[in-house]
Image (cartoon, helix red, strand yellow):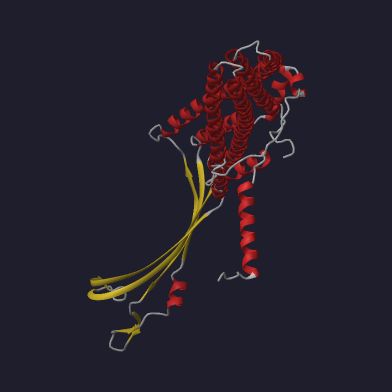
């Protein structure tokens, strides 16, 4: 007898199946991919940690302006032959003492080193923020490239599947013609070989598509990537207004928008602060200090002399009475003038000067690299557009040639081998149009990126 499940159980089961199918059918948009990568990419997380470290460094730089304050306390036992502090005699005894104190120091002047350290800390925070921004831009570009690669591989797979379907229909038709004696069996064998080759191309296209999905999933740091897929977006290779700009205008805009030069300039400013800090070590330093101390003894004490001339011994005073009576203060200022310190200040200054020159060189190199990258991106985009237009023209010509070949093959004026050759050239032309199309789209994205247009315009 079949036992009917409760209605509630069936509802939960159906809901679970629906959620599972929905999770498996989720397709990622480019916006979602970029957003997820910016939140989970390991390199970005490391860059965010660098920013947090820079903030901690500023806290440390602020702290050096504050006075130092340290408390100390001790309690000791002296056992054996000790001087009795009451009688002044050496006795075998056990005595106890408690002492406590406070010490404070504040830097009044040290060659403006503290001020320059704080300015350097602020610059370090800025440099870390610029570096984080650059990391996010690089990841966004990589994600966009991987996303477009998947779209290309998807469309290429469709082309290969269409080719396979066409050749399988041709094979079926050829089998009928061979059976009717209309064409020789050799033509059928050529068609079968073509179908086998098409299946190999489909498998290769499927593998390429899977690897491209895997690459993007790994870039996003996804753990479960077996069902990962992206939204099928129909991108058009439309003209870009940025490409109509003068190259020198794009370079000028890139110098304003891109963080590479800002990073180099900030690092140069940090190197300049390091030189000032090193120079400050040659100047005198002035430190203010203050200390407070008190002690308590647990030994007996003399409170008077009796009629026989012997001292009258009493116990120790109360703890807080002694603490108040024995307290003391010590304060003043200390001037330190560096004269000879094993050349440490001099060698440190020389190192910072060398680092400053290196930062100047890096800044110039960063500017040259940016100019070269922008001009290269513009050239690559123009070349990609020419390649796409040439591929489109070749495709149009191959399409007409293939249509003409189909007409000739249908009336028996072309053998199967020549027809398959024409068809292969046509399919290759289709694939080349797709490849050059997505190559052009991405390379235009790079130029727009240098011009200040984000990867995701609605982001």
Identify the residue at the far top of this view: 413
Query: Which residue occupies the foreground of this view, 358 or 139?
Result: 139
Count every numbered label the image shows and give the total: 0
Q: Give the vertical position of 330 relative to 236 (above or below).
A: below
Query: Which residue occupies the foreground of this view, 433 or 6?
Result: 6
Q: Tell me if 345 is positioned left or right of 20 in this view.
A: left
- The quarter of the picture where the N terminus appears is bottom right
- At which x and y percent is residue 260? 61, 29
Residue 109 visible at all: no
Q: Dividing the picture into quarters, in which one does residue 303 lie?
A: bottom left
Residue 143 visible at all: yes
Q: Give the vertical position of 356 relative to 33 (above or below).
A: above
Q: Tell me if 305 is positioned left or right of 207 in this view.
A: left
Q: Give the vertical position of 117 relative to 97 (above or below).
A: above
- At which x and y percent is residue 275? 53, 31
Q: Tell me if 343 is positioned left or right of 259 in this view.
A: left
- At which x and y percent is residue 454? 70, 33
Residue drawn at x 64%, y 26% as measured from the top left: 166
- The quarter of the picture where the C terminus appears is top right
Query: Which residue occupies the foreground of this view, 353 or 415?
Result: 415
- At which x and y percent is residue 90? 23, 72
Q: Dividing the picture into quarters, in which one does residue 372 lie?
A: top right
Query: Which residue occupies the foreground of this view, 331 or 109?
Result: 109
Q: Give the vertical position of 117 relative to 369 (above or below).
A: below
Identify the residue at the far front of this view: 180
């Amino acid at each position: 007898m079949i036992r009917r499940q409760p209605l509630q159980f069936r509802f939960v089961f159906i809901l679970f199946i629906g959620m599972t199918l929905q999770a498996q059918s989720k397709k990622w948009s480019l916006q979602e991919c970029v957003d997820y990568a910016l939140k989970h990419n390991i390199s970005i997380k490391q860059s965010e940690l660098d920013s947090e470290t820079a903030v901690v460094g500023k806290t440390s730089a602020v702290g050096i302006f504050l006075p130092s304050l340290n408390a100390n306390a001790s309690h000791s036992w002296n056992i054996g032959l000790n001087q009795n502090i009451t009688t002044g005699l050496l006795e075998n005894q056990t005595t106890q003492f408690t002492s406590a104190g406070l010490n404070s120091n504040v830097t009044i002047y040290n060659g403006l080193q503290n001020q320059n350290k704080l300015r350097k800390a602020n610059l370090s925070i800025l440099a870390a923020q610029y570096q984080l921004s650059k990391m996010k831009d690089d990841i966004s570009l990589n994600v966009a490239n991987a996303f477009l690669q998947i779209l290309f591989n998807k469309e290429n797979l469709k082309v290969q599947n269409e080719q396979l379907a066409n050749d399988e229909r041709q094979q079926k038709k050829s089998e009928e013609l061979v059976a009717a004696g209309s064409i020789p069996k050799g033509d059928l064998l050529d068609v079968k070989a073509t179908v086998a080759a098409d299946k190999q191309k489909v498998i290769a296209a499927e593998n390429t598509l899977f690897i491209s999905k895997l690459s993007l999933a790994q870039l996003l740091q996804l753990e479960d990537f077996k069902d990962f897929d992206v939204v099928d977006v129909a991108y058009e290779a439309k003209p870009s207004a940025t490409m109509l700009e003068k190259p020198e205008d794009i370079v000028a805009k890139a110098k304003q928008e891109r963080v590479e030069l800002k990073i180099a300039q900030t690092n140069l400013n940090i190197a300049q602060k390091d030189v000032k800090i090193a120079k400050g070590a040659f100047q005198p330093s002035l430190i203010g200090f203050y200390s407070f101390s008190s002690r308590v003894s647990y030994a007996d004490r003399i409170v008077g002399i009796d009629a026989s001339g012997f001292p009258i011994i009493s116990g120790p005073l109360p703890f807080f009475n002694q603490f108040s009576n024995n307290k003391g203060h010590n304060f003043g200022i200390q001037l330190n003038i560096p004269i000879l310190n094993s050349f440490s200040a001099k060698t440190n200054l020389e190192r910072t000067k060398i680092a400053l020159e290196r930062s100047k060189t890096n800044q110039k190199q960063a500017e040259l690299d940016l100019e070269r990258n922008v001009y290269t991106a513009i050239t690559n985009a123009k070349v990609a557009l020419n390649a796409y237009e040439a591929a489109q023209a070749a495709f149009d010509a191959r399409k007409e040639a293939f249509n003409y070949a189909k007409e000739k093959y249908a009336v028996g004026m072309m053998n199967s081998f020549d027809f398959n050759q024409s068809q292969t050239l046509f399919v290759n032309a289709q694939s080349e149009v797709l490849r050059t199309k997505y190559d052009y789209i991405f390379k235009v994205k790079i130029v727009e990126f240098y011009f200040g247009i984000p990867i995701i315009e609605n982001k």
